[in-house]
Image (spheres, helix red, strand yellow):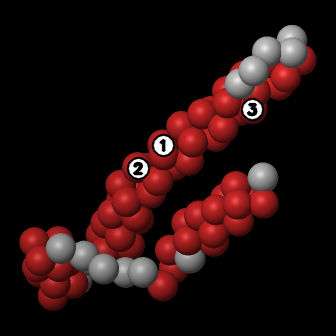
C-alpha cells in the first residue's frame, strides 16, 4: 500500500508540474513562430495544453488500470483467505 501511495503522489506531482514543461515538435514550433510573427499569440498556449493533454492520457489510463488490478487482486486474496483456501 505504501508503494501505491508513493507512485500515486509521484504521478500526481508529475501531472501538476505541467507549467514548466513547454516543449513542442518542430512543425508545431514553426507554426507558432509564423503566427507570432503575424501578431497571433494565443495559439501557442492552446497548442501547449493540447500536447500536455495528449501526453497525460496514457499515464492516466495506466494508473486507472493499475488501480483496478490492485483492487481486484486485493478482493481475490481476501476471498481466498476468508474461505480458508490456499492462495
Q: Which secondary structure, mark 1?
A: helix
Q: Along the horizontal axis of the image, is 40 left or right of 35?
A: right
Seen from the viewer's position, the closer of residues 68 and 81 is 81
Identify residue for label 2. 58
- The residue drawn where x is 78% and y is 52% is 1
Structural distance between the alpha carbons of marks 1 and 2: 5 Å
Instruction: Kindly identify which residue carries mark 1.
Output: 61
Of all residues, the one furthest to the front in this rendering is 86
Callout count: 3
Nearer-the-camera pick, 49 or 6? 6
Q: Is residue 31 visible?
A: no
Residue in the picture at 48% in, 46% down:
62
Res. 74 mark: 3
The local secondary structure at tag 3 comes to: helix
- Image spot of residue 25 (x, y percent): 18, 73
Residue 49: image location, x then y, percent? 41, 65
Q: Are marks 1 and 2 in contact (CB under 8 Å)?
A: yes
Name which quarter of the figure residue 66 lies in.
top right
- Residue at image position (42%, 81%) is 21
Under circle 2, the secondary element is helix
What is the CA distance from the residue labelled 3 to the residue labelled 1?
20 Å
Disc 3 versus disc 2: nearer the observer: 3
**Residue 43 at x, y percent in the picture:** 30, 69
Amino acid at each position: 500500500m505504501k508503494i501505491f501511495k508513493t507512485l500515486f503522489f509521484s504521478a500526481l506531482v508529475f501531472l501538476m508540474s505541467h507549467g514548466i514543461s513547454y516543449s513542442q515538435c518542430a512543425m508545431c514550433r514553426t507554426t507558432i513562430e509564423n503566427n507570432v510573427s503575424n501578431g497571433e499569440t494565443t495559439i501557442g498556449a492552446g497548442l501547449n495544453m493540447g500536447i500536455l493533454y495528449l501526453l497525460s492520457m496514457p499515464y492516466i489510463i495506466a494508473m486507472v488500470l493499475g488501480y483496478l488490478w490492485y483492487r481486484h487482486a486485493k478482493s481475490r486474496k481476501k476471498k481466498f483467505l476468508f474461505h480458508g483456501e490456499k492462495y
